[in-house]
Image: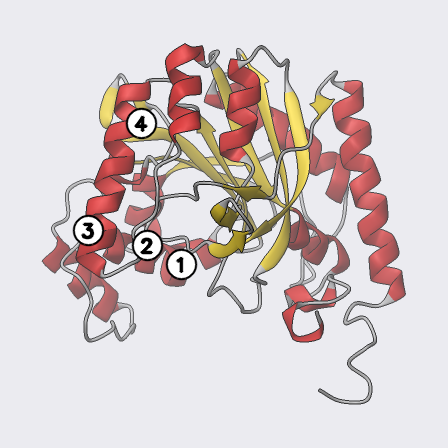
Amino acid sequence: MTGTDWRPAASLETLALRAQLMALVREYFAAAGVMEVETPVLAAAPVTDVHLASLATRVAGRGNFYLQTSPEYAMKRLLAAGAPDIYQIARVFRDGERGAQHNPEFTLVEWYRRGFDLDTLMRDCAQLLAKLLGAGRDRSGRTRDLASPQYLTYRDAMKEYAGVDALEAAPAELRVCVTRHGIDPPRAAPDDRDFWLDLLMSTVVGPRLGAGRLCFLHDYPASQAALARLNPAEPRVARRFEIYLAGIELANGFHELADAGEQRARFEHDLRERAQRGLPAVPIDDRLLAALQHGLPDCSGVALGFDRLVMLAAGAGRIEEVIAFPIERA
């Protein structure tokens, strides 16, 4: 601590811009007839995803609870109970994440649209981002064209920027590709395709996406489906997208999986993977599975990193420039 760390890390001007953007989010969804909801920050079950670490706490008389990495599970329970289109501005938490674009506590704008397929949701995202960012310049000084997004498959992006076929390459080939791009892999790197694909995406491909305009990266490998449906026309890929602008990942969206049996199988696969990696065992969210069994309406949903959006709007290079009190000052 120092004598000045009581002060906010972000300027008051930036915090005013943040408030303006949050008001525009609410204005957009109010005009579209999307209902704002609130769900618990604490829940009895966390995500099982091996790439996300939940923060745990204990509640007297109730046992272990987890700070949510996303409001997704609870929002899907609302949809299964008959809620209309919904959105939430949520405070979420992910352990072990701190860097230029990461803070352990951050803000997500998450929404679900009934009857939307992935293409319709991508257009919805483009409209919201155009409203929020408007005409401006990216950090390199180039003009942003938010009216003409780029739509690029995961496979095509990997071929163009990394020179490898994401659906065909074996782990050994991906390892060679990583080395060819001047990246030193960790010594204990697993013999796992998705590990190498994630490394290439985060270091080689992602930073080159969204130069001057939005890039919708879609049709991820099925092994990275998470909570998305597989593409019936090409089951090797999932109906999932991410949005990039100026090399920054802004959002992650799915045509939502509604099959309770398939979702349970994915959770159980995650738990086996966690055990193999020596990660803590966590409970499966049986309430989500019960909601899916009851019936999730056909819908698509997306989570938008609000702090990163403010970074782009403010021309900031680090996330603490747009947060009042990042973890070091919390």
Tag 2, which secondary structure? helix
**Amino acid identity at mark 1:** Ser
Q: Earlier in the sequence, mark 2 or mark 3?
A: 3
Q: Which mark is residue 193?
A: 3
Q: What residue is rendered at 27% in x and 75% in y?
A: 184
Q: Quadrant of residue 28?
A: top right
Q: What residue is rendered at 35% in x and 42% in y?
A: 283
**Amino acid identity at mark 2:** Asp
**Amino acid identity at mark 4:** Gln
Q: Is residue 168 above or below residue 259?
A: below
**Amino acid identity at mark 3:** Arg
Q: Earlier in the sequence, mark 3 or mark 1?
A: 3
Label 2 vs label 4: CA separation? 22 Å
Q: Residue furthest bottom?
A: 2
Q: Is residue 16 above or below residue 126?
A: below
What residue is disc 2 on?
Answer: 198
